């Protein structure tokens, strides 16, 4: 199994690579002006730790998973952390304010 997972956050881009029996984690600063730069830097760091050339890694990988929280945080910042608005969101499992929704 050869898998790459990348999570682009507001500050850091985290990369986890499962390469056969080896597992490595790498991190780079998130580059907001071009998200691919931080993505590629984290991936290159993982490749260096595995001693695998980046182009070889991309040719051999079985899957690449990508996730980000940037949209969520951008929306919350746009709301200026207006907790009165957030507290009016409703729980998906019942019609109640989200702050009273208990995790299951």
Image (spheres, grey):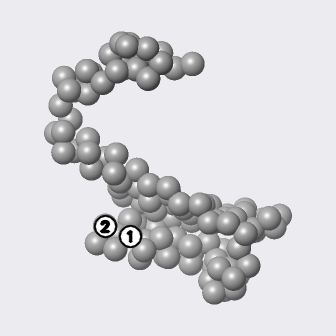
**Callout 2 secondary element:** loop
Can you see residue 22? yes
Question: Which residue position holds label 2?
Answer: 32
Image: 69 above or below 22: above
Q: Which one is nearer the viewer's eye here, 79 or 10? A: 79
- Expressed as whole percent of the image width and height from the top left, the position of residue 28 reads 46, 67
The quadrant where residue 94 appears:
top left
The quadrant where residue 56 appears:
bottom right
Q: Going 47% across and 70% down the picture, which residue do you hit?
A: 39
Can you see residue 25? no
**Callout 1 secondary element:** helix
Q: Going 57% across and 19% down the picture, which residue do you hit?
A: 104
The Cα–Cα distance between marks 2 and 1, rounded to whole angstroms, is: 6 Å
Disc marking residue 35? 1
| Residues marked 2 and 1 touching at CB (< 8 Å) | yes
Q: Is residue 17 left or right of residue 104?
A: right
Q: Going 56% across and 73% down the picture, which residue do you hit?
A: 43
Mark 2 burial class by Cα count in 10 Å: few <14, some 14-19, many 20+: some
Q: Going 33% across and 51% down the picture, which residue do you hit?
A: 71
Toward the right, the furthest residue is 21
Location of the N terminus by quadrant is bottom right
- Expressed as whole percent of the image width and height from the top left, the position of residue 64 reads 62, 66
Q: Is residue 5 left or right of residue 3?
A: left
Mark 1 burial class by Cα count in 10 Å: few <14, some 14-19, many 20+: few
- Expressed as whole percent of the image width and height from the top left, the position of residue 78 reads 18, 45
Q: Which one is nearer the viewer's eye here, 21 or 67? A: 67
């Amino acid at each position: 199994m050869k898998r790459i997972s990348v999570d682009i956050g507001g500050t850091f881009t985290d990369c986890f690579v499962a390469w056969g029996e080896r597992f490595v984690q790498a991190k780079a600063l998130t580059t907001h002006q071009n998200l691919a730069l931080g993505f590629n830097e984290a991936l290159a760091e993982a490749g260096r730790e595995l001693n695998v050339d980046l182009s070889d890694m991309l040719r051999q990988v079985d899957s690449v998973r990508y996730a980000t929280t940037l949209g969520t945080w951008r929306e919350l910042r746009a709301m200026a952390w207006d907790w009165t608005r957030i507290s009016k969101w409703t729980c998906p499992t019942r019609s109640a304010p989200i702050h009273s929704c208990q995790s299951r």
